[in-house]
Structures are given as C-alpha cells and as structure tokens.
Image (cartoon, rainbow, N blue to C red):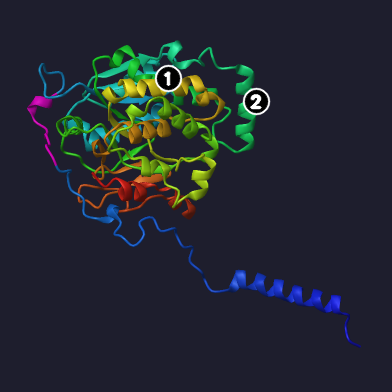
Amino acid sequence: MALARPIRALIAVSIFLWCFFLYQIFGSSRQIRLPERFGHETDPVLELTGEPEGTLTYSSDQYKPGIPNSARINATILALVRNEELRGMIQSMRDLERTWNHKFNYPWTFFNDVPFTEEFKEKTSAETNAETRYELIPKEHWDMPPWINKDLYEESVKILKENKVQYADKLSYHSMCRWNSGMFYKHPALENMRYYWRVEPDVRFFCDVDYDVFRYMQDNNKTYGFTITLYDAPQSIPTLWPETIKFLAQHPEYLHKNNALPWLSDRTRRPEHNKQANGYSTCHFWSNFEIADMNFWRSKPYEDYFNHLDRAGGFFYERWGDAPVHSIALGLFEDSSKIHWFRDIGYQHVPFFNCPNSPKCRGCVTGKFTDGESWLHREDCRPNWFKYVGMG
C-alpha cells in the first residue's frame, strides 16, 4: 500500500538531513578559507625588510647611560602599569632592552594610579642601565569627571554588557582609555618630553633595531609610528564618529588637506562595521604600540577635539578607546605622510603580530598575523592603510 504524501515527504527530508550530517563528518576535508587581506597584490609583510629610508642615527659612546650632553633627545619609554603586572612588565622590558634600548639607554617612565611598591621599583630598575622614573597619576586625571551622570553611566554599562562589549563594567578601563586619550601628556613628569614609545606588560619584541627610533621620528618629520592597525568593535563606539562629524562641522579648518579620511570612512571591506559605527570604518592603530610626538596631542586641534569628546561622555557612557580616538585625530588633522609603519619592528600583543621578513628577527614566523582563531585574520586593517595611504 502506497505511503501517504506527508509521510513520503518526511522520509525524504530525513534522508537528506542524514546524508548532510554524514557529509559534514566524513566529507571532503575542506580548508577554512582565510579572508584575503591584500587582494591580488603582494603581502608587504612578506617582503624583505630593511631599515627605513631617511636619516638614521646609530649607537655610539654618546648614548652611554648617565653621561651629560648625551645624544639622546627629549624622549622616554612610557608604561601605564599596575604593581601586580610586574612579571609581565619585566618580560616586556627584557625584550625591548635586548633588541633596542641597551644601545641607546632612553629612560623608562612608569605611571600608576596608586603608588608603586618597592618591589616593583627594585625589580624593574634592575632590568635596565637607563634611568627609571615612577610617577603617580593625579586623581583629577584619572577619576570620573564631574559632568558624567553616574546613574546614566550605570544604565549604559548594562547596555554595553548586553551587547557583549569587553571590559564595559570595569570603571578603571574607562578611566584608562580617557587617560591614554587626553591626559597622560599633561603629567608634569612629561612636561619637557616630546617623544614617547608606549610599552605594555606581556608584549614581545623580536627584531634587533640598530638606529635611534626617536631621532628617526625627529629627523624625518614623523608624528606617529605604528606596527598594527585593526578594526574596532563597533558596539563600543556607536556615537564616536557622529560626534567627530559634529566637531568637524564646527572646525572645518582643522581637516588636513592630506588627510586619511578614506581609510577612516571605508565601507568596502567591513561594511557591517561602517554601518554599526555610523560611518566609521572602525580602523585604528593598535595603540598598545605607538611611538609618537606629543606635540600633536598638545596642539589646539587635538586638544579641542579631545575636550569635545570628553564632554560628550563617550569614554564612560560607551567604551571609547584611546586607539580609535588617536587614530581618528591623526587621520583627520595630520598630514598622513607623517604617519609611519614601523615594518622592521617585530612585535606581538596577544593575539596579533607584526613579524617582518628580516634576518634581524628571531622568535616569530615571517608574515604571521595571529596565532588565534582563523576569523581573526579579518581584523587586520593594514591592507586598507596601504591602499589609501601607502607604506611610508
């Protein structure tokens, strides 16, 4: 007796689903295709890398520690670090001292919102022949500013957590982002400093660097140096770009004629990011590594921009990071030719790498971007920087 049509359909669907299930388990071993980062062009990270073009200054007796009238310029290695991050800070110091600073002996300046312990001071100072300085952040630079509505902040944190925004409920993280964005360079300890190299705990440096990077910045008229540029989480910054557009409408004179606006507003590679961030590509320099001229942060365009953002409250009501804030400002207000990719500096901050093709590098795989999940390759925004700005 023939089976009823509904039963025949049910049997057919069951067979299809069973076959599909078996195919998923025993079918052809399909490779996960990584998104193309560089289209059909050569990956610049794989190209043989030497020292940058331009004026370079090498190590000499003029860089010995503690000597008067040394060749060092007004610059420091800068670290915002907690006492409990001592082990990670020592790891970072050992790498940077081994690959670079033992040749130049630039001072280390450590910042904390609480006093450093004697153990921290003793163990970090033992890692370098250079001067070490330990500075306390003023409360007015770190605490939530008085114009932030605490009830609104609490409600905002709940929404951010629902949207799975990382660190949303950590007040110290919001304070850190604000401090790194617009406060650190106002500290009295940096009053006479112009350049800094930001270093965080638990980062790695893989390549010997034989020239003075600070003098490179000065002698070649560079404002900012980076190794990695990424896409940000758009849920953390939905009103950052609208506030930026509002600021630009008030100050069109601040927009540099050789800006990087196409990089900031690109919607081709990650259109969903551009949409969720209301017009911002979310591309930013990963600021846990940055070598920069503080005169840019001290300039009127940047100070006005930071103050506008600070009053808007997004450092607390959302999770605006210093990375997108720095990057947007640089991309709009600075000559993009003054932003330099330090392609020769091997660097890792978990889970991302900048690993050059150079005989001076040891301990990382050439061209490797991440040792995490394959989808993390999509987070690389360097191809867009090379496309719109170049590799200067």
Residue under the point 18% across and 43% down: 52
Q: Nearer the viewer, residue 135 or 174?
A: 174
Q: Is residue 123 visible?
A: no
Distance from Cα at disc 1 to Cα at disc 2:
23 Å
Point out the image quarter for the C terminus. Answer: top left
Q: Which amino acid does label 1 sit on?
A: Asn
Q: The residue under label 2 is which amino acid type?
A: Glu
Left or right of 211 in this view: 108: right
Left/right of residue 192 with respect to residue 147 in the rendered view: left
Residue at point 42% right, 43% down?
265
Secondary structure category for the residue under label 2: helix
Mark 2: few/some/many CA within 10 Å (<14, 14-19, 20+): few
Name the residue furthest left.
61
In this rendering, the count of numbered labels is 2
Residue 384, x across and y down, in percent: 36, 49
Q: How crowded is mark 1: few (under 14 residues within 10 Å), some or many (20 or more)?
A: few
Residue, x 50% and y 14% (percent of image)?
Answer: 145
Query: Where's the N terminus, which quadrant?
Result: bottom right
Disc 1, SS: helix
Task: Find the residue positioned furthest to the right.
Answer: 1
Residue 321, compared with residue 385, is above or below; it is above
Q: Give the range drawn in magenta.
A: 54-64
| Picture coordinates of residue 48, whole percent (x, y) | 21, 54
Find disc 2 in the rendering and name its residue.
155
Corner quadrant of residue 110: top left
Describe residue 65's horizontal placement relative to residue 82 as left or right: left
**Residue 27 on image: x %, y %:** 57, 74
Q: Is the magenta stretch mostly helix, strand or loop?
A: loop
